[in-house]
């Protein structure tokens, strides 16, 4: 019997596999037994009513996809009326992803969500689409510290900070989130990118730029998870291009305590439960009794090797 | 518009590996794919679609699945059929499937067509790929004893598909083409006005052409005739999760975004906005 349970940022999860924000909703219930997931993570919500970006909102690329969905949001009342009651029907912990244009806005929204049925807040301080030029709080350690501190003061719920890979200072930003009081960091959101249609000379996304996700970004984000794991003592949740049980194991070895699966669910709706089954089988085959032991278990990861790899 | 009769309880979706029975060309652009598929796939309603994991072939590496309307779903034979135009890397991959190969498909998905009990005669107007989507509607109408006039529009006679399929279902079929000019919107308008005058148009259904949609919307508004339209939009998840497939709709004087995969692909005709 393999013990798949993990403890992540103030939450005990039955297994380390959960959806990535924005890639998960009620519709998956048609094909997946949702009670099997480690946690539920909602699409990012905002207080403001938002329409989202113009179409086309997605484009395929080699081994991945670009999206410029934006954050269409019907606001908090709609969330309380429809979304929350729907997810409350399960025992699985519900993580609510939030975003706001200001640190104050983040804090107010987090405070408003301290409700029965909400197990944790994931602060999407990284969404590249939300502010002009793809700028986000998590591109800057000082802005990260400020917004996480205010969030910490506003809520008693476990607080996860979702970071952006669009920075050269991921470790410093993870440290800022930890210092601000985050219980975990989610690494990471999408990598800012674009694509041009060579027939029409037009950008392939209505919003010109968008976020790259899927297998194409896995090595980049895996490296960042490892850097964050070394930099902080709070848990790191890995997210980027995970599609198979081996991908999840790889992330855990690099330092993740749990993983989020996004794009893979679009191609294979049962991806998350397939990964859970595969993790169980993998642990049996390797004689690993407790999956939590995998976190950071990569061998030979001393700083000398790291410095060597960078040169 | 009269209240719609409740559509049959939609079948739950499933992801399955379906064996290919046939995949043959019907003309120089379209292929007809027949798959062995049990429930719930073969219970797909008219207007519902499947999300197909098209095989990668050489240079063609489709990343997303591709949405495809049910052309025919046969619960007795345990079969699902598609009629598709070979256009890009996904459909080129589909075109390589041979009998015995297997295709991963998710469905049936989305909200399909529904028929009001008060409608005795309906008009179905489609063009190109839209005809594939409308064919099972004619079959559903036939089962319910509703008279169907099907106006099938295409570039040329060689490109009109499904004439025999519509005929077999007892539809009165009118073919219009670009080659002889009969497909021009003003000529189709004359046809529709004739059908309205003859009492053969209790409801309008369309798919596949913006101009034909606008025509049916205008005549429908003028004569108080309700209708439905099946729409397309690029999809990633097909399950209402990613919000990439939105289109604008008119609802109560406001413009709202709806997801084609989840709120549709079939919508009340008056809500749709042209493209
Ligand atoms: C609900 C629905 C039902 C459909 N039913 C049929 C059908 O019965 N027969 C048929 O021939 N076609 C149908 N289509 C269109 C079909 O999905 C596209 O032709 C197909 O996705 C093209 O893929 P490709 O890789 O060959 O082309 P590419 O141009 O290489 O595709 C690139 C991307 O654009 C998307 N795309 C391209 N054209 C369309 C389109 N018209 N609609 C939506 N996405 C598109 C693709 O899915 C892919 O993500 C339907 C579309 C929808 C949304
Ligand atoms: C269509 C789409 C919508 C997304 N929406 C959100 C969102 O609302 N909030 C957020 O924090 N991340 C969002 N993301 C990012 C994912 O949560 C995830 O961080 C990213 O896709 C990388 O993981 P993946 O490679 O497994 O998809 C979105 C991603 C996609 C593809
Ligand atoms: S395709 Fe994802 S919401 Fe419609």
Image (cartoon, coloured by chain):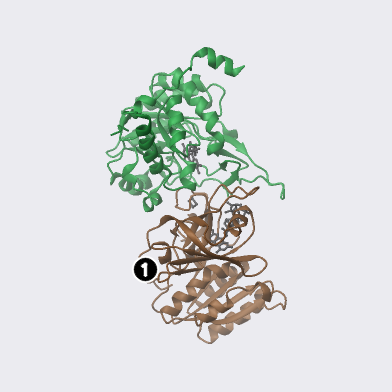
Chain colours: A green, B brown
Q: Which quadrant, please, contains the N terminus of chain A?
A: top left
Q: Residue at x 40, y 51 (%)?
A: A27
Q: Chain of mark 1?
A: B
Return the x and y of residue A71 as percentages of the image width and height.
49, 42
Residue B207 is at least partly visible in this image: no
* Residue B245 image position (x, y, % from top left): 52, 53
Return the residue at label 1. Answer: B8
Task: Say which of A244 and B194 sits in front.
Answer: A244
Q: Position of residue A114 (x, y in %)?
A: 31, 35
Quadrant of picture, ligand 1: bottom right
Decide: is B194 above or below A158. below
- Look at 71% across and 77% down and name the residue there: B181
Determine which quarter of the picture holds residue A44: top left
Q: Position of residue B272 (x, y in %)?
A: 53, 63
**Residue extending farthest top:** A304
Give the camera-side residue of A248 and A37. Answer: A248
Total labels drawn = 1
Q: Quadrant of the C terminus of chain A?
A: top right
Q: In the displayed structure, does residue A25 sit left or right of residue B133? A: left
Which sits in the foreground, A17 or B35? B35
Please indicate whether residue A124 sits to the left or right of residue B160 in the image. left
């Amino acid at each position: 019997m393999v013990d798949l349970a993990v403890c992540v940022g103030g939450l005990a999860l039955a297994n380390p596999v959960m959806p990535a924000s924005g890639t998960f909703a009620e519709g998956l219930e048609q094909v997946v037994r949702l009670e099997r997931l480690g946690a539920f993570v909602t699409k990012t919500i905002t207080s403001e009513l938002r329409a989202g970006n113009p179409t086309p909102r997605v484009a395929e690329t080699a081994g991945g996809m670009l999206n410029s969905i934006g954050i269409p949001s019907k606001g908090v009342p709609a969330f309380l009326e429809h979304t929350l009651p729907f997810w409350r029907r399960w025992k699985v912990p519900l993580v609510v992803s939030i975003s706001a244009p200001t640190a104050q806005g983040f804090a107010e929204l987090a405070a408003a969500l301290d409700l029965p049925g909400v197990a944790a807040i994931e602060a999407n301080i990284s969404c590249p689409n939300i502010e002009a030029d793809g700028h986000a709080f998590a591109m800057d350690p000082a802005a990260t510290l400020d917004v996480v501190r205010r969030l910490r003061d506003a809520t008693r719920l476990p607080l996860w900070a979702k970071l952006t890979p669009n920075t050269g200072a991921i470790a410093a930003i993870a440290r800022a989130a930890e210092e601000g009081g985050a219980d975990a960091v989610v690494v990471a959101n999408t990598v800012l990118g674009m694509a041009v249609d060579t027939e029409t000379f037009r950008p392939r996304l209505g919003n010109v730029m968008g976020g790259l996700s899927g297998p194409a970004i896995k090595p980049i984000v895996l490296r960042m998870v490892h850097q964050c794991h070394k930099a902080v003592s709070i848990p790191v949740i890995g997210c980027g291009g995970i599609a198979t049980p081996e991908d999840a194991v790889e992330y855990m070895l690099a330092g993740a305590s749990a993983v989020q699966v996004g794009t893979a669910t679009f191609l294979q709706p049962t991806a998350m439960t397939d990964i859970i089954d595969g993790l169980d089988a993998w642990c049996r085959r390797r004689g690993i009794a407790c999956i939590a032991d995998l976190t950071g278990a990569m061998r030979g990861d001393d700083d000398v090797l790291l410095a060597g790899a960078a040169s | 518009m009269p209240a719609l009769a409740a559509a049959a309880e939609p079948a739950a979706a499933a992801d399955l590996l379906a064996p290919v029975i046939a995949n043959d060309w019907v003309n120089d652009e379209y292929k007809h794919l027949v798959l062995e598929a049990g429930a719930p796939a073969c219970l797909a309603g008219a207007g519902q679609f499947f999300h197909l994991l098209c095989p990668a072939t050489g240079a063609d590496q489709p990343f997303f699945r591709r949405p495809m309307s049910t052309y025919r779903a046969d619960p007795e034979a345990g079969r699902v059929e598609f009629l598709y135009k070979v256009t890009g890397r996904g459909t080129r991959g589909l075109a390589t499937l041979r009998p015995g190969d297997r295709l991963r498909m998710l469905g049936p998905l989305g909200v399909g067509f529904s028929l009001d009990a008060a409608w005795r005669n309906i008009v179905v107007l489609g063009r190109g790929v839209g005809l594939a989507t409308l064919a099972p509607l004619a079959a559903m109408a036939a089962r319910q004893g509703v008279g169907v006039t099907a106006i099938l529009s295409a570039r040329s006679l060689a490109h009109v598909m499904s004439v025999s399929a519509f005929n077999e279902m007892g539809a009165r079929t009118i073919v219009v083409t670009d080659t002889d000019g009969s497909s021009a919107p003003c000529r189709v308008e004359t046809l529709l006005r004739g059908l309205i005058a003859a009492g053969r148009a209790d409801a309008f259904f369309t798919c596949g052409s913006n101009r034909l949609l606008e025509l049916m919307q205008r005549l429908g508004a003028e004569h108080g005739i309700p209708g439905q339209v099946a729409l397309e939009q690029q999809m990633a998840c097909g399950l209402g999760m990613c919000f990439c497939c939105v289109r604008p709709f008119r609802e109560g004087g406001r413009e709202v975004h709806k997801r084609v995969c989840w709120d549709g692909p079939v919508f009340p005709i008056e809500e749709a906005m042209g493209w």
